[in-house]
Amino acid sequence: MIVAAGQGHPGGDLSATDIVAALYFDILRFDPTAPLAPSRDRFILSKGHCTGALYTALAGAGFFPEADLDTYLQPGSRLNGHPNRTYLPGVETNTGPLGHGLPVGVGIAVAGQIDNADYRVFVLTGDGELQEGSMWEAAMFAGHRGLGNLTVIVDRNRLQQGARTEDTNSLEPLGGKWASFGWQVVEVDGHDHAALLAAFDDACAPRNQPRVIIANTIKGKGVSFMENQAGWHHGVPNPEQYQQALAELEAEIHA
């Protein structure tokens, strides 16, 4: 999709893909034929630039035809660079400017709490995004409200656009920060599906606190020349790199 479009964010797409796949194909409760059903679970991609991962999951889950993925980032396409809820079924809210997804997710979770609804809210955030003050305002309020219907997943790949997170504005001790705001904290390998599913299952159990899953990931996971390289926050592989990336990803799938 990124090669055909000539633009995109492959590093973050690949660090988040396992998380998104585990959610859409094992955890989230939804009906793609009724994308606005009040009982649905809500998923918000707060790191809204990683639409490659989101759109492939939505298509695979049946929200729109997989053939539409061929139009990714093309003029007039519904699959634009940042998700837009007026364009695509399954998109809960528009994201892209960082720091917005969690505040919206907290609002949705508060609404569910007030209505005594049983839907769950999941928000996927980047770790660089946690340098936005709005994220911590939302986290503080979620802890105060005891939003047990809210789960945040931090894509902890330790890289942001152009640099390492710890060199830009240190986040550690990250778990301690969330715990101090009244959150349950669990840390997992964000590429281990069994660990992710166990963490999500626990997150879905009844509780009176919001839960954060710090998912340790690798930016550009599965493609050797992209892994842990800040320069692949965005970029397009050349033809030779494209073939190498496909071969390495296929090998990892069948390993």
Image: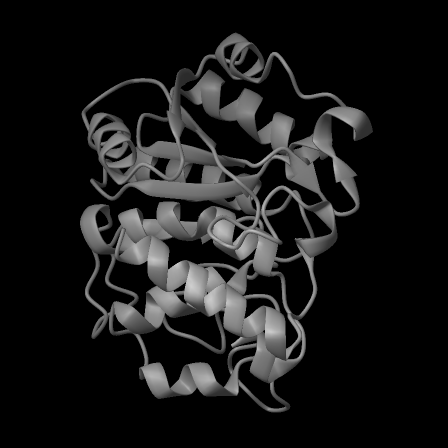
Describe residue 196's horizontal placement relative to residue 102 as left or right: left
- Residue at left offset 69%, top offset 60%: 234
Describe residue 239's horizontal placement relative to residue 45 as left or right: right
Looking at the image, can residue 198 be seen? yes
Rendered location of residue 253, percent (x, y): 30, 56
Task: Classify residue 199 by image quadrant.
Answer: top left
Report the coloring of the rendering. one colour
- Residue at left offset 52%, top offset 17%: 178
Total marks drawn? 0
- Residue at left offset 64%, top offset 15%: 172
Rendered location of residue 213, percent (x, y): 40, 28
Q: Is residue 161 above or below residue 78?
A: above
Viewer-side residue, 106 vs 250: 250
Q: Is residue 232 above or below residue 99?
A: below
Rendered location of residue 131, percent (x, y): 72, 31
Viewer-side residue, 199 vs 86: 199
Describe residue 164's horizontal placement relative to residue 53 as left or right: right
Task: Classify residue 57 by image quadrant.
Answer: bottom left
Looking at the image, can residue 48 be seen? no
- Residue at left offset 72%, top offset 31%: 165
Q: Is residue 196 above or below residue 181?
A: below
Viewer-side residue, 90 vs 221: 221
Rendered location of residue 37, percent (x, y): 24, 63
Viewer-side residue, 175 vs 78: 175
Describe residue 177's horizontal placement relative to residue 247 as left or right: right
